[in-house]
Image (spheres, rainbow, N blue to C red):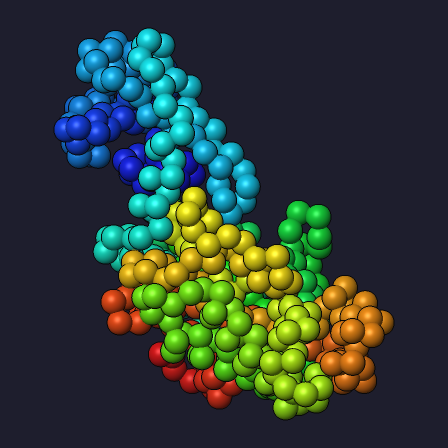
């Protein structure tokens, strides 16, 4: 997989290339490795600079071993080298090996500028993400149609992967899928390297949470659906599902330019807490009181969503000058606190989980326990969790939802029974 910044600027698919742009003139240069002819045995005919110049639409292509000479010939006053810290992951983006040119290097300026450009997608980028959503949405429907008790979690996951590859040419998932059934659905990133890898057999009455996305031309989708493996919600499952769906619909209706993302996170909490109050899981005064006590974070500890693009959790969440990360439970997990702008692509993924690692300690904390109905909380533990995730692009007037999957309980049950979709 190509490094995301290199792909963003040049679209190069091959490994070990370098790219340069002249800030003053806009002239674009690529530098390709000079491979020995023996590589043709393994890689096919080796293409030369002229072919790659035409393929990538740049002004010139040279070999890497010519880079120092070419750059010295351009005589720029400074070389801006990409180097910085991803504010989402905290990981450094290592700078490329600087050529020996004697030209002064600036490793502080370029990263934030290019990162901000990546936040606002151009129409061509949105179209690729729209395609990945179309294929990914169909992959989720394929899982729902084949679901039945007794299947392994990994069999549902493999259905998604096969559908996206065979029908959409999406060879790779955007990330390792989360294929969680029963109480595994309460584990936010179930299936990571240190946990069981989707190896549970589904059972009658299970909810299944599938968080899967596909990648196309390095851009991708990130979609979550939750549904009953046997095609019918139980009353408890439906209560939780409708609370989360209410949150997602309220947020998407309120989104648009100028809206602060933390306000949308709070709106999701309001709707989920209202739903939990109506089914007797939480109690005590008003939703305002529950919000002030951070009860929402006990049921949805993650942030409402994240930027999406060349990375699943795309860059630009907390750039210099943007609103800082909150210290409040739940809010501190937001991957951005920015005000929405047209061209941003972001996920909307409220969830409600009955996670014993959060709820059992809360039941023993007097400040939290007074808002929790113990018997109801314990009764709902078997639900596991519900997450619903759409990918949306912010427009001049609101949003465009790129994800198209069954969402209402009636739609979910109908599709699982064989009804057409969409």
In the current view of this chain or complex, which residue is farthest to the right? Answer: 364
Q: Nearer the viewer, residue 146 or 390?
A: 390
Give x and y (percent) for residue 370: 78, 80
Identity of the residue drawn at 54% across and 81% down: 271
Compared to 306, does 355 lie above or below? below
Compared to 217, does 105 lie above or below? above
Identity of the residue drawn at 69% across and 77% down: 383
Please give left or right for residue 64 compared with residue 74 in the image.
right
Identity of the residue drawn at 54% across and 44% down: 89
Marks counted in the figure total 0
Q: Quadrant of the N terminus?
A: top left
Please give left or right for residue 126 compared with residue 406 in the image.
left
Please give left or right for residue 74 compared with residue 249 in the image.
left
Residue 79 image-quadrant placement = top left
Instruction: Specify whether residue 365 is in view.
Output: yes
Give x and y (percent) for residue 366: 82, 74
Give x and y (percent) for residue 7: 33, 38
Give x and y (percent) for residue 244: 55, 78
Residue 4 image-quadrant placement = top left
Q: Nearer the viewer, residue 314 or 51?
A: 314
Please give left or right for residue 5 compared with residue 355 in the image.
left
Identity of the residue drawn at 32% across and 10% down: 101
Q: Nearer the viewer, residue 32 or 333?
A: 333
Instruction: Specify whether residue 37 is in view.
Output: no
Q: Quadrant of the C terminus?
A: bottom left
Compared to 351, does 214 lie above or below? above
Residue 364 image-quadrant placement = bottom right
């Amino acid at each position: 997989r190509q490094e995301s910044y290199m792909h963003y600027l040049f679209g190069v698919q091959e490994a070990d290339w370098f790219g340069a742009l002249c800030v003053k003139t806009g002239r674009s240069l690529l530098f390709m490795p000079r491979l020995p002819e023996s590589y043709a045995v393994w890689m096919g005919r080796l293409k030369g600079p002229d072919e790659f110049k035409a393929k990538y639409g740049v002004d010139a292509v040279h070999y890497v071993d010519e880079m120092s000479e070419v750059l010295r010939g351009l005589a720029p006053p400074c070389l801006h080298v990409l180097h910085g810290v991803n504010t989402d992951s905290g990981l450094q983006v290592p700078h490329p090996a600087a050529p020996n040119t004697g030209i002064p290097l600036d490793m502080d300026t370029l990263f934030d500028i290019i990162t901000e450009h990546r936040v606002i997608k151009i129409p061509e980028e949105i179209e690729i993400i729209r395609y990945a959503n179309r294929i990914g949405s169909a992959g989720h429907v394929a899982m729902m149609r084949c679901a039945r008790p007794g299947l392994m979690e990994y069999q549902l996951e493999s259905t998604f992967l096969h559908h996206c590859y065979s029908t959409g040419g999406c060879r790779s998932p955007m990330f390792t899928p989360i294929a969680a059934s029963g109480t595994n659905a309460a584990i936010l990133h179930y299936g990571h390297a240190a946990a069981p890898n989707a190896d549970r057999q589904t059972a009658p009455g299970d909810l299944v949470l599938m968080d899967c996305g596909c990648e196309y031309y390095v851009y991708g989708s990130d979609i979550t659906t939750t549904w009953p493996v046997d095609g019918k919600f139980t009353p408890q499952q439906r209560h939780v599902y409708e609370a989360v769906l209410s949150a997602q619909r309220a947020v998407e209706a309120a989104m648009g330019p100028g809206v602060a993302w933390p306000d949308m996170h709070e709106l999701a909490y309001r709707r989920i807490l209202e739903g939990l109050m109506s089914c007797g899981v939480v109690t005590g005064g008003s939703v305002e009181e529950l919000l002030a006590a951070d009860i929402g974070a006990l049921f949805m500890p993650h942030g409402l969503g994240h930027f999406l693009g060349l990375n699943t959790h795309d860059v630009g969440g907390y750039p210099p000058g943007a609103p800082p990360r909150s210290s409040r439970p739940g809010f501190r997990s937001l991957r951005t606190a920015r005000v929405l702008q047209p061209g941003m692509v972001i996920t909307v993924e409220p969830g409600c989980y009955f996670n014993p690692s959060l709820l059992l300690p809360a039941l023993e904390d007097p400040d939290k326990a007074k808002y929790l109905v113990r018997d109801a909380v314990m009764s709902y533990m078997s639900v596991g969790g519900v997450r619903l995730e759409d990918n949306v692009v912010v427009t001049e007037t609101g949003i465009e939802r790129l994800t198209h999957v069954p969402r209402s309980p009636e739609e979910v049950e109908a599709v699982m029974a064989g009804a057409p979709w969409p």
